[in-house]
Structure formats: structure tokens, C-alpha cells
Amino acid sequence: MKKRKFCKNNSALKLWAFISAAGAGFLLSGTDMAGVASFADISIAGALPLPMAGAVLAGEFLQCMASHTVGRNIVKITAMVIIIIAKMFYEPKNTPRINGLTTAMGVFTAGTAVSAIIGEIPYKLLFYTFYGGLAGFTAYSLAYILSGLKKRFVLDFSTTTGCAYAIVYTICVSSLCSVKVPYINIGLIFGITVTLFGAYYYCHTGGVMCGALTACGAFLSSVDYGMTVVLLPAAGLLTGYLNKQKNTTASLCFVGINFTLMVLTGITQNSIYSMIDVVCSAILFLIISPAYSDKWFTTGGDRFSALPEVLAVRMGFLADTVRTVRTESERISGMLSRKKDRSVPTEDVVNAVCTSCPKKIRCWQLNPQNTKSGFMKLSAMTEFSEENFPYEIRDCIYKSGLVNFYRKMTAEKAKERIISLRQSDNMTLLSEQMKTIEEIVHSAGKRLDVRFSSPISKMIKNKLNKFGFYPSQVISYYNSGNRLHTEIYFSRKNTPENFTRICDLVSDELKVPLDASAPVSSGEQVRIRLYEQPKYRLDVYSTSVCSENSDSENGDTFGTFGDGTGKSYVILSDGMGSGKTAAVESRMVVQMFKRLVGSGIDYPSAIKLINSIMMTKSPDETFATLDVVRIDLDTCGLTVIKSGASATLIRHRGNVIKIMSPTFPIGIYSKSEIFSCQCDFEEGDIIIMFSDGISENEYRFIKELLLQNDDLKKIVDEICAKAEVFNPAFHTDDITVIGIRATAKNVR
């Protein structure tokens, strides 16, 4: 059904584009510019794709047939035919440069051929060279604009794109001015309306630029038309200073300014008709302006106008967040240091292994020297196996028990060595902390790829003030996906109790459905982010099982959150051991990561900061793994982040990808190790995350399960249920399994 709906909508769009192209050809067929036939219709045909170019030719031919002007427009018709024939050969490699060259050569060839037939080629050759060059350059500009709109549907008036828009706009105004309509001039009404929009929404700069281009287009059409709007840039300049007034007030002032200028320069019959056009333009402005949105327009300057203010607010907010996290970590460290030292006594190898052995008397009483020598050799080994046992105790019936015991003892000794190295790592840790702060400040000062919207920021702040909410700062902007985002900051004393009410008020004011991220507190301020719904959403399902040795509490912590910018995070942390102690460590890691990243800190700096806190908060050995999946809900881009975590499995296009990271957990080493990678991911793919309670022996089963099923809940439950089958030591550790899938959603 979705596919049929998409095809239906796509067909309707193509039909509408075809009709519009034919209408443009019909309307512009008999237009003039600078005393000669306008080349606007030829340039449109040269810039559009092959089917649309054919529609322009069809509209042109119908108008010529209806007005009996086929002979008069034979050069234009011939030029379009040549352009269409050329497009049949190079259409797959359609570029603005090729479109411009084809249009210029088509006009020159058609003009030269017709002139040769009627015997006017000597003095017409230079004219068609110049005429073809202008038509080709206009076609290049229009094709350049259309190629930019395909990448990003925003009218960009900055840099070279702005020049292309100026050229196309001037030619359009000039051509429309010669369309014959009683009492009014379509070209002037169009140009004056655009000038009023530019003055009202982009101040005096927009008014002057649009007015000057409109006057230029009018002069190209006719000197009489140009003289009637020669002072339009001045009217746009003066009206631009009224941009803070209501649109009704601005339009009335615009009409009054034009009337005053007309009286000062002398009233003529043309100026009276011009005033009719001005009034029509003002009425048209009042009708269209309520639907206007700067979402579809950018001038380049709106990217940087609010940047200093935003940087100051964000960096202050980040500084408050870091200070609050540090204060809380010191408080937790003080609480933990007051607890009694809980040490577990280590039993002797004889009591641990040999107590229940029936050969104990023969080994330790009848042959004690050889037995002691064998155990000394065994303890000196670096690798333990039953095959390389010392010959003095080669007849021991508990070889496997001894191997496991010494392996455990070796692991504990290695852990003790890691703990003893912590004191010597203090200076390294301090250096790492300073580096982390430097990275945080640096990331806060990065240039943002957004377009700020001052009008919407003011509108939201006024709306909230009207209903008794008093934010300290409101910042609205459009991201790279052209979705609206709003950051609202409240001081601690003005923090509202109900943030849902704020989201509803703003959505109602903007007539746009918005979602809200969870509030984030820096200690002194609280921030809430409102945003338009992204293209994708995440389906997340998880299940957990506690180990037998736990105190009925899972030591793994799982969480999901969105940072309010279109990125969603799924986090899994496995604390050291199992039960309540492990849960405290993993919960602390997850909460700190969520708070720091939600405040705006990039994830590498956040993980380094968490590692420093885990290293210094307590003298006890504490660490936890961190497994994070970050998905951009605008593009479905996937980033896998790991610190000592288990593997992550991704099903993508019929294959299962295994992502592993040879890194230390958080809190085990002063220099945090972070593994991150960008992975291919798209709608319908599945991600499986799990703690280390899942054995590697189960990976093959998980792969087959992913390739044969699409039910996320069934996959996750089946993985957890089969963990005991593939791992005999199933109950020695907590288990958590998480399934994630991205799905597209319909956003109005």
C-alpha cells in the first residue's frame, strides 16, 4: 500500500510539473524583452529534463497556433526542437554546463539556419551569437538552481547560487512585463510583491536588492515600465525598517511610500497604472504572508547572525554541567570512603582442592616433599593445563580443579597488579582530565551546521511569556535535514513543572507538531529541546535474566534516550560482578553518559570524563563496560561505541556483521580506551546488543536466527532462552539482550 501510494504521489507530481512546464511555454511564447522576442521560454526548455522540455515546446506551439504567429516564432521553435534532440543523446549526463552550452548552440544554429534561408545571415550572425549566449547563460543559471534544489529543497540566495537566482529573477520579471493583461502588469505585480516580501522579512537589505532587480527587469522589458518602478529600491529600503511592525502596517506604509514618490516625481498615466500594480501587490502580500516560512529560504547570513550568542549560552551551560557532575562525584566518593573495608579471605589450595580427596593422606603424609615440589612448580607456571602437569603430582585425580584454581589465582593476581598501578597513574589521570576539558570546550566552539531563525525564536518567547513562562533564552534553528529545533533555557527559579504544556503551546503557535526531549539540568539552568519529528524511529526490545549468585538484582543497566538533535542512543553497561554492587556501577555509568551527552558534550569527551570519575570515586576496584549504539534518525546513520563491551551483531542486507572491540572497560585504566566505527545501516536492519553473559558459542545460532526471522521480540527472547544451552556457566553472570530496528514513520 505504501509503494502504491508513493507511486501515485510521484505520478501526480510529474503530471503537475508537466502541466506547469507547458503553461510556462504557453505564457511566455509571445513575450518581448529589450525590443526583441524573449528567450525565457528557450532557457526554460534548455534547463529542464527532456519530458519537461517537450512540455515547454508543446505550450509554445499551441500559443503560436492560437495566435497565428508560427512564422514569427520559427527561430524559437526550431531552437527548442534542436535542444530536445540534443537532450535525447546526453540526458543521462545532464549538467548545468551542458544545458547552457546546448541552449546557446541551439539558438545560434536555429537563428543562423533561418537567416540563411531568408538571406539575412551577414548582419544577423552577430545578433544570434549574442542572443544565444544570453539564452544559454540563463539556462545554465536555472539548471544550476534546479540541481541545488534536488540536493536540498531550500532557496539559497548566498554566494554563486544567489547570482543565479538574480539572473533568473530579472529575466522572469522582464518577460512577464510584456504579457498582455488589461489594466495590470503581471511582471510588475510579481516583482513588487517579491520586493515587499524581501523588505518585510529581510529588512532594508532585502528590500533594496529585490527592488533593484525588479527595476532592472522592468527596464529590460521597456523603458516606460522601468521608469514607473525606478524608485522601487527606495521604497523597499524604507519599508525594510518596518519589519518589526504587523504585515498590515508594513504593506500600507509600502503603498504610501510608493504613492508619495509618485507624486514627487510627477503623476502620469503610466504611474497611475503602476499604483494599481502596487495595490494589487500589497493585497497579494497580505494573502500570502501568513503562510510564509523562512524554512525554505536562506541568505547565508542567517547561519552566523546568532552564533556568538549561542556559543556563549552553550558553553556556560556545559561548564555548569561539568561542575555539577564533579561535585556529585566528590560527594559519592566521600560516602563510599566512609564504608568499612570488606575483604574476602583467600583459602589455601589444599583446603580448597584436596580436602575431599581420598588420596590426601598418601600425597601429604607419605610423600610430602614431592607433593610440595609439584605444587611449587605448578604455581610457577604461566599457562595451566592437564597436559603439562608436573610429574610429582601427575597422578592427581583433581587436575581440572587445580587448573581452574590456579587460573583463578592468576587472574586475581593480575587484578591486584592493576590496582597497585593506580597510584602511579595519578599524574596521567590528571593530564587526561585536563585534555577532556579542553576537548569539551573545543567542541562547544565548533561551527554549527544549522540555520538560525530569529523570527521563530521571538515568536516562541512571546508566546511563553503570554502564558506565564519566562525562559532566559530561546534559540530556534533548522538542521541539515531542514527540521526545526528549538532550545529553551530556564533559570532554576523559573523552571516550570510541566514541560509538556510548553511543547503544546509552541506546537500550537507554529502550527507544527513538535516532540520534546527530556529536560537536562546544569545545576543553575534547565534546558528543554523541542524538535520536528525525524524521518525514522527506533523499535527497541530488551530482556534480562539475573545470575544465581545475584541478590535478585541485575548488574546490567540498559537505557535509551535522544539528545534532541535527531540522534538516538541505546546504552548497555555491565558492572563488575553481579547483583546490587554491579548494578550501582553500571547505573552510574549509564546515568552520567546520558546526562553529559544530553547536555551537548560529544561522546568521546563524555566517556573520558566518566572514566576519570570511576577511577577516582573510590579506592575499591570498580569498573563497568559501556556499549552504545547511536543512530541518526534523519539519515539512519549508525555509530557503534564500545569500551570493554561484548560484540554487537548487525543484520544488514542479508548479511550479519560482527563488531568487536579489544578495549578496557571504564574505570580500569587511567587512559580510557574508546572504540567507535561507522556502520552501514538502513530501515529494516536489526541490531543485537548483549552483555557478556552470552557466550561466543551462541553467535552462530544468533546469526541463523537473525537471517530467518523479522520478529524483534521473538529474536531477543530466543537468544536469552538459549543462553544456558550454549554456555554451561549460564548462571555465573547476569544476562541482558537488546534488539533494535529502525523504521520510517509518516511525518506531516
Image (cartoon, rainbow, N blue to C red):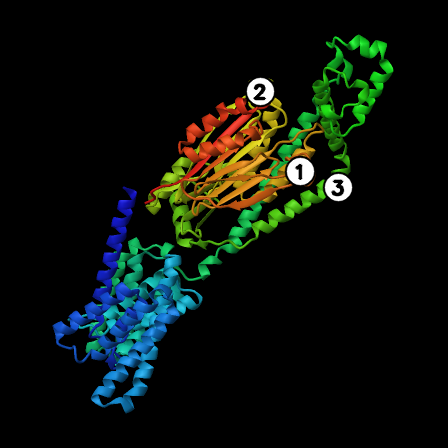
Q: Secondary structure at mark 1?
A: helix
Image height of 443 relative to 393, above or below: below
Mark 3 and mark 2: Cα distance apart in space: 40 Å
Quarter location, residue 31? bottom left
Residue designated by label 2: 731
Residue designated by label 1: 612
Q: Secondary structure at mark 3?
A: helix
Going by the numbered disc 3, the residue's amino acid type is Met
Name the mark on residue 495.
Answer: none
Image height of 705 relative to 634, above or below: above
Figure quadrant of the C terminus: top left
Going by the numbered disc 1, the residue's amino acid type is Ser
- Res 495 visible: no
Please say if the residues under marks 3 and 1 sit with CB atoms less than 8 Å apart. no
Rendering coords of residue 298 (x, y %): 40, 59
Mark 3 and mark 1: Cα distance apart in space: 12 Å
Circle 3 residues within 10 Å: few <14, some 14–19, many ≥20: few
Residue designated by label 3: 427
Rendering coords of residue 86 (x, y %): 31, 71
Nearer the N terminus, badge 3 or badge 1? 3
